[in-house]
Image (cartoon, rainbow, N blue to C red):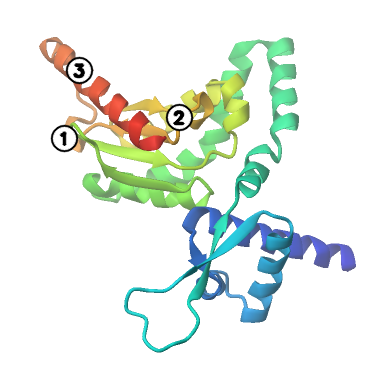
Amino acid sequence: MKHAEGGAERSTRARVARLILEHGPITAAALGERLGLTPAGVRRHLDALLAEGLTEHRAARPARQRGRGRPAKQFVITDAGRSAFEHAYDDLAGSALRFLAERLGERAVADFARAQVAGLVSRLEPALCEVPADQRVRVLAEALSAEGYAASASKAPVGGEQLCQHHCPVAHVAAEFPHLCEAETEAFARILGTPVQRLATIAHGDGVCTTHVSSPALGGRKQPSAGLGATGEAENTIHSSSKETGR
């Protein structure tokens, strides 16, 4: 029982840390509401995370706060906390993929990468078919955030939209095995039903993983060859912009 309780505590603490990563700066009250925890329960987990150096707090007074009460503490993830997420299974995953590549070849690694994102496709593809085309990137971003990618959607500088992932749990493994990023990009195109292009990745040292999503009006249609040059110039413009804002 004690072992089970310890596992439950660790699981809840990990959820608290992940919410801080995705939504920080965030108050203890907001964390409690999202997780259904009592104030005492939230404080217990926050105290442990602070003691481990995985989070830190800062004082922030809302612009319209009334009265003379103390400003609410907001919690943010530290560099150590971010690294804990990124490196949790890196060594094991990297060793497993290297073994797979050595025994069965690079194609086996690519197949494994596609299998990893197949679950995301099977869960989201049917649901997004019911979502208006102009809202699909936002819905996908919300789904990715729920899985720990801290994603957001916005209009692209030159047409279409941008899907940004501010956290990548497998960034260090993906740096060695780009098949993971490639499979994810293929999955996004299938889920959204429109061409996409990966412009930047955390695995390659960029500030965020940025994917350009073509306008829904262009989805599923081949563009005439006369327009390829202009499209290439637009993509280069978007690429430069995304790298600058991501850092």
Q: Residue farthest to the bottom?
A: 67
Q: Residues within 10 Å of mark 3 (few under 14, many from 20)?
A: few
- Earlier in the chain: of badge 2 and badge 1, it is 2
Q: Dot 2 corresponds to which residue? A: 206
Residue 64 vertical position relative to residue 138 in the rendered view, above or below: below
Q: Nearer the viewer, mark 2 or mark 1?
A: 2
Location of residue 30 in the rendering, given as x and y in whole percent from the top left corner? 50, 72
User: Label 3: which residue?
Assistant: 233
The residue lying toward the viewer, choosing from 25 and 142, is 25
Tell me the residue at 47%/50% (across/down): 145
Q: Which residue is mark 1?
A: 217
Asked where in the image residue 45 lies, by quadrant, the reply is: bottom right
Residue 191 seen anywhere in this rendered image of the structure: no
For badge 1, the amino acid type reads Ala
Distance from the alpha carbon under mark 2 to that under mark 1: 29 Å
The x and y percentages for residue 105 are 66, 10
Picture coordinates of residue 10, whole percent (x, y)? 74, 60
Mark 1 Cα shell of 10 Å, populated few (<14), some (14-19), many (≥20): few
The residue that appears at 66% across and 67% down in the rendered structure is 46
How many angstroms separate mark 3 from mark 2 (CA)? 21 Å
Contact between labelled residues 3 and 1, with CB atoms less than 8 Å apart: no
Q: Earlier in the sequence, mark 1 or mark 3?
A: 1
Residue at x 11% of width, y 10% of height = 226
Q: Nearer the viewer, residue 47 or 120?
A: 47
Q: Point out the image quarter for the N terminus.
A: bottom right
> What label sits on residue 12 in the rendered view?
none
Q: Quadrant of residue 37?
A: bottom right
Q: Tell me if I can see residue 247 in this picture.
A: yes
Against 229, is 168 above or below?
below
Q: Nearer the viewer, residue 98 or 220?
A: 98
